[in-house]
Image (spheres, rainbow, N blue to C red):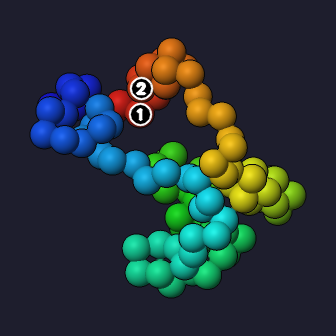
Amino acid sequence: MAGQVNTDGANGVLGINIPSLVSIGASGPYFHSGAVQSLDAVLENVTHRSLGNGGTDTLSNAGDRVKVVKFLKSIDLTTPTFPEQTMNQAKTLCLP
């Protein structure tokens, strides 16, 4: 049931183990099929970037996409993690 903690080994409240973003800029190819070679190309895909938000494209501005890619490429082992309190507050954002 949505909102309940999964007890069979998955970490997320929805039973999903979300992959780490550490070194995501060096871990292509992307998508389940490996069809996209760069983060830039991932964000060029309007269909993928507008899924899950009613079809609204929140990254239609090319400059914003460049900033997101720069941010993602900056995530490495020296990047501080979010405090647990912040993560607990964010859980409600992920629930249906």
Which residue occupies 24% across, 42% down? 10
The label shown at residue 30 is none
Quarter of the image for residue 66 reads: bottom right
Quarter of the image for residue 57 reads: bottom right
Q: Are marks 1 and 2 in contact (CB under 8 Å)?
A: yes
Q: Would you say residue 20 is visible in this rendering?
A: yes
Q: Judge from the rendering whether residue 62 lies leftward or rightward of residue 5; answer left or right.
A: right
- Residue located beneath label 1 in the image: 94
In depth, the one of 54 and 90 nearer the eye is: 90
In depth, the one of 61 and 74 nearer the eye is: 74
Q: Secondary structure at mark 2?
A: helix
In the displayed structure, 57 sits above or below 95; it is: below
**Residue reaching furthest right?**
63
Counting every numbered tag in the picture gives: 2
Q: Residues within 10 Å of mark 2 (few under 14, many from 20)?
A: few
Q: The residue under label 2 is which amino acid type?
A: Lys
In depth, the one of 92 and 20 nearer the eye is: 20
In the displayed structure, 3 sits above or below 39; it is: above
Q: Position of residue 36 (x, y in %)?
A: 57, 80
Q: Would you say residue 55 is visible in this rendering?
A: no
Which residue occupies 32% across, 37% down? 12
Q: The residue under label 1 is which amino acid type?
A: Cys
Q: Judge from the rendering whether residue 76 lies leftward or rightward of residue 2; answer left or right.
A: right
Q: Position of residue 4 (x, y in %)?
A: 20, 25
- Residue located beneath label 2 in the image: 91
